[in-house]
């Protein structure tokens, strides 16, 4: 175990505390068992190391273990935690738990056996802890970490330092929020870069390699993370990669399952399950009509890629601007809100707010007779009556 403690000290020595994700202040760090889920590349490890660094405790008291470390091919988590606790450990951060067999059961046992030990763990967004052996859903408080919002991207780039905006407050008086921004602030000057390169924290330093890294990321999710699912047959990995490619060339679209099955070689009866897993992995987003079930076997009404960076990385053709706008709107709103397809307009949020998304010339005609309806326009800087700039929805978290 000494080598794990040495690794903890090394990692904390190089942990940057200058920028923390929005979720950092949302987590109740006093809870004794905390889980953080999220897609690959969204910054879960950095978040944990930042919090651990701020505890200012020696590694013998507060340690970081990554469960994909070779150490755990020869040593069990349960035995390692027992030794750590006996030597005075009080805080244990466990990363990449889904890489370790029976992780949920062993964490449950450690939580129950050592009442003075705090455990914080991270795992892939595809894990469902309620279906794991040793169900942790009643013991742990779970959080989800998405990719960067437009606001967070601007903070990292040292362009903006303000707080997030609540949706209901933005809709109630959108013009009020113009006062939050410096007079010289030109959001559109940075918005296109965010759409292409700003969602994944790892891309900030080297955006030129982002699209290559995204392709590698997707392959890793399908071939490694999805392989941990009980119902997943690794022999279908290549077909699922082909499914992602087919979707990327057509989004947003209304899926024809028979056509998708023919193009990918995946049996039609399996497609809905695979689409569900790809949504859990934060590669695609599935939209359903308002009032309809969102069960796994329910066919989605519309499919999007999960964020605009994926659009630019996977789309071989010129990315259609309307698709970019709608994908951005959905990716930012879906973090804190429920989204459906309404009978009229593009999006229905929390069963209450209707939105029509378009360019600067988009008219109010389609929503003028509706209550609680707004036009969301790209290529405008600031709001007017019932018209809100698209970029402002990047400030919700």
Image (tube, rainbow, N blue to C red):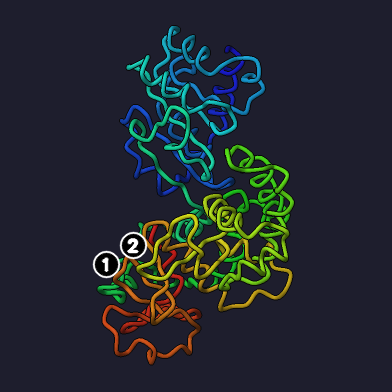
Residue at (39% x, 66% y) in the render? 292
Does residue 8 sit above or below 317 in this rendering?
above
Would residue 96 be found to the left or right of residue 57 on screen? right
Would residue 228 be found to the left or right of residue 106 on screen? right
Distance CA(mark 1)–CA(mark 2): 7 Å
Residue, disc 2: 165
Residue, disc 1: 169
Nearest the eye: 281 or 45: 281
Residue at (43% x, 16% y) in the render? 61
Image quarter (top left, top right, bottom left or bottom right) of the N terminus: top right
The local secondary structure at tag 2 comes to loop
Image quarter (top left, top right, bottom left or bottom right) of the C terminus: bottom left
Does residue 154 sit above or below 216 in this rendering?
below
Does residue 90 sit above or below 347 in this rendering?
above
Classify 10 Å Cα crowding around label 2: few (below 14), some (14-19), many (20 and above): some
Would residue 275 be found to the left or right of residue 332 on screen? right
Residue at (60% x, 57% y) in the render? 269
Contact between marks 1 and 2 (CB within 8 A): the answer is: yes
Nearest the eye: 346 or 236: 236
Classify 10 Å Cα crowding around label 1: few (below 14), some (14-19), many (20 and above): few
Would residue 356 be found to the left or right of residue 312 on screen? left
Picture quarter containing residue 271? bottom right
Nearest the eye: 126 or 364: 126
């Amino acid at each position: 175990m000494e080598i794990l403690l040495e690794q903890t000290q090394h990692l904390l020595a190089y942990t940057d505390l200058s920028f923390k994700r929005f979720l950092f202040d949302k987590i109740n760090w006093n809870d004794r068992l905390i889980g953080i889920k999220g897609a690959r590349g969204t910054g879960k490890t950095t978040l944990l190391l930042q919090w651990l660094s701020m505890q200012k405790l020696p590694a013998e008291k507060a340690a970081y273990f990554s469960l994909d470390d070779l150490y755990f091919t020869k040593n069990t988590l349960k035995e390692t935690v027992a030794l750590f606790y006996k030597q005075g450990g009080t805080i244990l951060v466990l990363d990449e738990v889904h890489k370790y067999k029976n992780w949920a059961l062993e964490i449950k046992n450690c939580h129950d056996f050592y009442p003075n030990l705090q455990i914080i763990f991270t795992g892939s967004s595809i894990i469902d802890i309620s279906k794991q052996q040793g169900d942790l859903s009643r013991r742990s408080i779970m959080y989800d970490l998405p990719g960067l919002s437009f606001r967070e991207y601007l903070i990292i780039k040292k362009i903006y330092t303000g707080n997030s905006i609540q949706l209901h407050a933005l809709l109630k008086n959108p013009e009020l929020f113009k006062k939050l921004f410096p007079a010289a602030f030109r959001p559109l000057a940075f918005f296109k870069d965010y759409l292409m390169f700003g969602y994944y924290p790892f891309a900030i330093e080297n955006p030129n390699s982002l699209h290559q890294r995204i392709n590698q990321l997707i392959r890793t999710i399908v071939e490694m993370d999805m392989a941990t699912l009980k119902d997943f047959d690794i022999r279908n990995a290549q077909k699922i990669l082909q499914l992602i490619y087919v979707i990327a060339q057509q989004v947003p679209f209304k899926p024809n399952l028979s056509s998708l099955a023919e193009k990918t070689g995946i049996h039609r009866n399996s497609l809905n399950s695979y689409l569900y897993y790809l949504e859990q992995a934060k590669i695609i987003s599935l939209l359903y009509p308002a009032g309809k079930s969102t069960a796994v076997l329910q066919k989605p009404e519309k499919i999007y890629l999960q964020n605009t960076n994926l659009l630019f990385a996977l789309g071989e053709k010129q990315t259609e601007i309307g698709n970019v706008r709608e994908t951005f709107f959905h990716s930012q709103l879906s973090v804190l809100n429920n989204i459906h397809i309404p009978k009229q307009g593009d999006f229905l949020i929390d069963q209450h707010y209707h939105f029509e998304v378009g360019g600067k010339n988009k008219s109010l005609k389609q929503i003028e007779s509706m209550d609680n309806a707004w036009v969301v326009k790209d290529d405008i800087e600031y709001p007017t009556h019932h018209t809100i700039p698209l970029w402002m929805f990047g400030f919700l978290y």
